[in-house]
Image: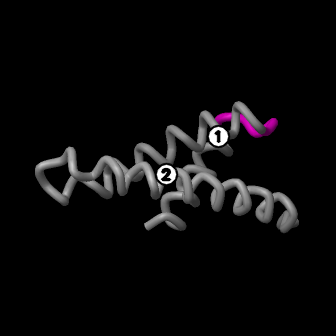
Amino acid sequence: MFNIELLKQYLLISIIISSITCSIVQKTKVLFPSSKIIPIYSLLLNIIIGIIFSYSFTTIRLPKCLWIGLLSYIGAD
């Protein structure tokens, strides 16, 4: 059975993370010489902050943290 409540929790966490990482990417994108690197940088930043945020403030562990990072990347871009 599909767990809608779990998906809602993941999306709520992803919204918080995407707002944080979107502002970080906007502030630091001037450091890159080419704009082709920015989506890769944003994906890595979303996954890293998603893992750190999930470990710090929730009981969600590694495989599910990657989904949160991916969902936050989709929401931020």
Quadrant that contains the C terminus: bottom left
The residue type indicated by label 1 comes to Pro
What number is the disc on residue 21? 2
Helix, strand, or loop for circle 2? Answer: helix
Left or right, 75 with reference to 35: right
Residue drawn 54% across the image and 52% down it? 20
Secondary structure, magenta segment, majority class: loop
Which quadrant of the rendered structure holds the N terminus?
bottom right
> In percent of the image, x 13 and y 54: which residue is there?
34
Q: Residue at x 49, y 48 (%)?
A: 46
Residue linked to disc 1: 63
Q: Residues within 10 Å of mark 1 (few under 14, many from 20)?
A: few
The residues colored magenta run 58-63
In the displayed structure, 30 sits above or below 60; it is below
Q: Quadrant of residue 56?
A: top right
Mark 2 neighbour density, 10 Å: few (under 14) some (14–19) many (20 or more): many
Q: Is residue 5 left or right of residue 13?
A: right
Left or right, 51 with respect to 74, comes to right
Which callout, 1 or 2, points at the residue further toward the start of the chain? 2
